[in-house]
Image: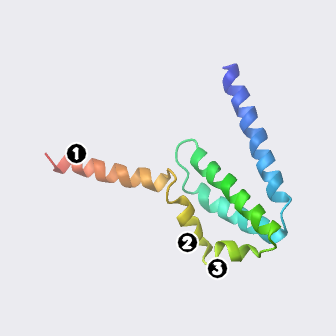
């Protein structure tokens, strides 16, 4: 039980450090990151670790963009939703689980 609490505290600290990195970025980057983050959480599956990994990678990408003096939309493009969908493509998402379950349930019932 103590190990679970230690892990939760460690995860919370790591998340706060991640968000501190975001807060250090220019305002337009912060805004876009938080909107993308909000969008991604809608698709999180399980413990959400796949989504967190994507967010860490996105922070790295955004920090590089800031360092290069790029506008945030030079990184994401104007269709930010499509950018997000591409990021989510290889993550375990809620919709993927639902798609797999739908197909599995139908095949189980109809294919003998």
Quarter of the picture holding the C terminus: top left
- The label shown at residue 95 is none
Q: Earlier in the sequence, mark 1 or mark 2?
A: 2
Cα distance between the residues tagged 3 and 1: 42 Å
Q: Where is mark 2, residue-wise?
A: 82
Q: Is residue 104 left or right of residue 47?
A: left
**Residue visible at 77% across and 49% down in the picture:** 18
Cα distance between the residues tagged 3 and 2: 9 Å
Instruction: Specify how the rendered protein is coloured.
Output: rainbow
**Residue visible at 80% across and 46% down in the picture:** 17
**Residue visible at 38% across and 55% down in the picture:** 99
**Mark 3 element type:** loop
Of badges 3 and 1, the one in the foreground is 3
- The label shown at residue 108 is 1
Cα distance between the residues tagged 1 and 2: 33 Å
Q: State yes or no: discs 3 and 1 in contact (Cβ < 8 Å).
A: no
Find residue 60 and report its horizontal and vertical position in percent. Answer: 72, 57
**Residue visible at 20% across and 47% down in the picture:** 109
Q: Where is mark 3, residue-wise?
A: 78
Q: State yes or no: discs 1 and 2 in contact (Cβ < 8 Å).
A: no
Tell which residue pokes out farthest to the left in this image: 112
Find residue 16 and report its horizontal and vertical position in percent. Answer: 79, 46
**Mark 1 element type:** helix
**Mark 2 element type:** helix
């Amino acid at each position: 039980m103590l190990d679970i609490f230690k892990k939760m505290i460690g995860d919370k600290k790591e998340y706060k450090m991640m968000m501190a990195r975001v807060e250090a970025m220019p305002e337009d980057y912060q805004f876009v990151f938080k909107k993308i983050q909000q969008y991604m959480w809608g698709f999180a599956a399980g413990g959400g670790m796949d989504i967190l990994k994507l967010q860490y990678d996105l922070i790295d990408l955004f920090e590089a963009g800031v360092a290069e003096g790029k506008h945030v939309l030079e990184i994401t493009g104007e269709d930010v939703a499509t950018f997000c969908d591409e990021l989510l493509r290889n993550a375990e998402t809620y919709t993927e689980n639902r798609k797999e379950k739908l197909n599995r349930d139908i095949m189980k019932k109809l294919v003998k």
